[in-house]
Image: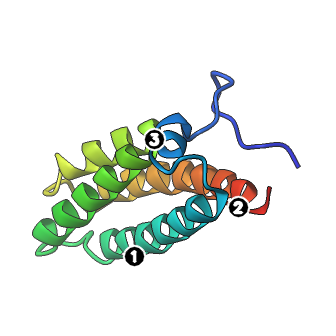
Amino acid sequence: MNAPYEDNGRPPVALENIREMLGGDPEREKELFQIFIESADECLEGMKNSRDPGGENNWRTQAHAFKGMSLNLGAGELGRLCAEAQKNPAAPREEKDRMLAEISAEYNKVKEFLQQQRQG
């Protein structure tokens, strides 16, 4: 199976910084990728549960956390999408649904890429 690449031909995660920080240790990378996936799943679920009025603070908090994790990992496009969501906590539900669909689609690319890295 081929890696899920962005339209620009680059992978959805730039691993150079992570690999440098971890000294190229594949076991530490696998552990980090698993922690990211578990945490990202929680953030995504939190955002899904915060789409209605009254959930603005939780939406912003979850989007902020997801953005930070994504950018630290090297998933720039996912981080950008989460930043957009973070800036729009009072958006109508339809707009939040659109943002979540974009975030979910990009996250699926990142997750698939990381799972392939863990297996490789």
The residue mark sitting in front, 2 or 1, is 2
Find residue 74 and name its label: 3
Horizontal side of residue 9 vs 46, given as left or right: right
- For the residues labelled 2 and 1, the Cα–Cα distance comes to 20 Å
Q: Residue furthest top?
A: 8
Amino acid on which the number 2 mark rests in the picture: Arg
Instruction: State how many labels appear.
Output: 3
Which label's residue is closer to the chain start, 2 or 3?
3
Q: Position of residue 104 (x, y in %)?
A: 51, 57
Question: For the residue carrying disc 1, how many other residues have a C-alpha within 10 Å: few (<14), some (14-19), or many (20+)?
Answer: some
Quadrant of the image occupied by residue 55: bottom left
Is tag 2's residue or tag 1's residue first in the polypeptide sequence? 1
Badge 3: residue crowd in 10 Å (few <14, some 14–19, many ≥20):
some
Element carrying mark 1: helix
- Image location (x, y in percent) of residue 29: 58, 58
Relative to the observer, which residue lies in front, 104 or 73? 73
**Nearer the observer, 50 or 25:** 25
Question: Do tag 2 and tag 3 residues touch (Cβ < 8 Å)?
Answer: no
Residue found at x 45% / y 52%: 103
Q: Nearer the viewer, residue 70 or 18?
A: 18
Residue 42 tag number: 1
**Residue at image point 55% right, 40% down:** 15
| Element carrying mark 2 | helix
> Which x, y percent locates residue 115?
69, 61
**In-image side of 39 versus 50 (left or right):** right
In the rendered view, tell whether residue 72 sits above or below residue 7: below
The span from disc 2 to disc 3 (Cα, nearest Å) is: 16 Å
Q: Which quadrant of the figure has residue 69? A: bottom left
Query: Is 54 located above or below residue 71 in the figure?
Result: below
| Label number found at residue 118 | 2
Residue type at tag 1? Glu
Give the amino acid type for the residue marked by disc 3 in the picture: Gly
